[in-house]
Structure formats: structure tokens, C-alpha cells
Amino acid sequence: MTTVTVWNEYRVEKEDDEAREVYPEGIHGAIADFLEDEEFDVQTATIDDPEHGLTEETLNETDVLTWWGHEAHEEVADEVVERVRQQVLSGMGLVVLHSGHFSKIFKRLMGTTCDLKWRNEAERERIWTVEPGHPIAEGVPESIEVPEAEMYGERFDVPAPDTLVFTSWFEGGEVFRSGCCYRRGAGRIFYFRPGHETYPIYHQSEIQQVVTNAVEWAENVNSTSPSFGNVPEPPEEG
Ligand code: ZN
């Protein structure tokens, strides 16, 4: 069974009435809820847990980590970020959501600023599936309409994704690479844009489908680890 750790900063839902109304159990609660329905083994962790809930033991048993953060990225300890990074390089999947684009872990894994344009005016967003044959697009319609969203616009300062699965259009005219696949070491990383705290986006079934597919895709199914370093003898011929 796939073990998923749903990580959430869990600050804005405590501070902001609007956010609390949309996500009374926190964003992690909403995400854990629909992932549990898919029969994943789900646990949650937040920034205020000891070691942010990301101890060595927790990470060792995690197949896929999902990450939502917003205003406290800088409070995440570098030691924990490095621990997560090592785990990704050795095969743990990572699904980074919405404002997680500015998390230390995502920036470190991308090596770029991960900056973008934004505007929070409850605009309509249409997310187009541009790679319909991809596992993350399975069962996802040609386009998903989000009635009210925060706009993220290009340029999104990330490396060109290995595969771009979704592209967003916004009412104001901007576009954005909304579903980006990467590989770092043995780990698979997916960035998925939707999910502002004051809109019920994670309650939307098509969005839940994408996150669920992303978790399945990001799980490392390759159990052989590469060996590194000096190899004294050439391999014997067949
Ligand atoms: Zn937001």
C-alpha cells in the first residue's frame, strides 16, 4: 500500500476566517480525506509539529509527500529541507501544490527562483490537459474550470519541465504552466498550481482526481538502487 504524507503549513486556516470556513480541518485535512478514499495509507504533518512532522522515520516510510505552504516557508528548518531532498533523490515522490512553489524544498530541487506573477481577484481559471496520454491526466477532462481562483502568470521561473501535463488560462489573459513533471535523482516531482486557501478548489472532484493521479505517478516503483564510485574491475563479459 502506498504511504502518503500530506504536509501542510497550517497557519492561514487558523488565522483567516475565510480560509477556515473553506477548510475547517485544514488544507491537509481536505487532501488527506480524498486520498484516504482512494485507499492510500495517509498521514498528515504540519509545520508546528516537532521537526515539522518530517522525522527520519516518517520520511523513511513515506512513498509520496505532498506539500502545501504559503507564508512560513522561511520557518522550515534547513536541516529538514535537506532531509526531504535526500529522500527525494533516493526515490520518494513529491507533489508540490500551489504556493508551495516558493517552498525551500521546491526551490532547492529546481535550482531557480520559482517566482511568478500573481493576482488574487477571484478570476475564472481554465486548466487545459495538454498531455492527455500522461498517467496524471487519466480520467481528467480536456479542461477543468475553476470558477474562482488566484491568478498565477508566466513567467514561472522553473526549469523546463520533463513533461508539461496542464496549462492554465485566466480570465485576465495570463497563462501558466500548471502541471509540471520533473525527475531529480530517483525521485519524481509534480508541481500542480491550483489550490488557494480561500477557494474550495481541493473540494472539486477533477482537482482531486489530478492530485490522486499525481500521487500514484510519483510513487517510485523501481526498487533497484544504482551503485556509485570507483569500479575496480570491468564487468565480466557474458
Ligand atoms: Zn494562493
Image: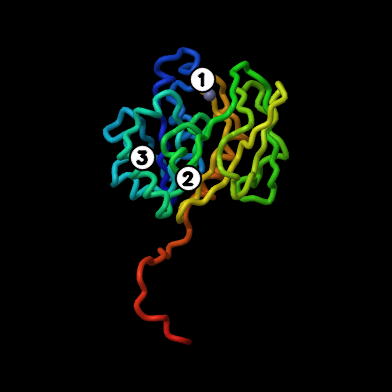
Q: Determine which of the numbered discs, if any, sits on residue 81 in the image.
A: 3
Residue found at the very far bottom of the displayed protein: 238
Foreground residue, 103 or 157?
157
Q: Residue at x 38, y 67 (%)?
A: 227
Residue type, mark 3 in image = Val
Residue type, mark 2 in image = Glu
Kindly identify which residue carries mark 1: 22
Q: How crowded is mark 3: few (under 14 residues within 10 Å), some or many (20 or more)?
A: some
Foreground residue, 210 or 69?
69
Q: How crowded is mark 2: few (under 14 residues within 10 Å), some or many (20 or more)?
A: few
Kindly identify which residue carries mark 2: 39
Looking at mark 2, is its residue's CB closer than 8 Å to ligand 1?
Answer: no
Foreground residue, 223 or 169?
169
Snapshot quadrant of residue 141 = top right
Residue type, mark 1 in image = Val
User: Is residue 65 shown left or right of residue 181?
Assistant: left
Q: Is residue 176 above or below residue 188?
A: above
First in residue order: circle 2 vs circle 3: 2
Residue 140, percent across and down? 66, 41
Numbered disc 1: secondary structure: helix
Tell me how far mark 2 sits from mark 3, CA to CA. Answer: 28 Å
Q: How crowded is mark 1: few (under 14 residues within 10 Å), some or many (20 or more)?
A: some
User: Is residue 176 shown left or right of residue 6?
Assistant: right
Residue found at the very far left of the displayed protein: 50
Q: Determine which of the numbered discs, if any, sits on residue 57 in the image.
A: none
Residue 42, percent across and down? 41, 41
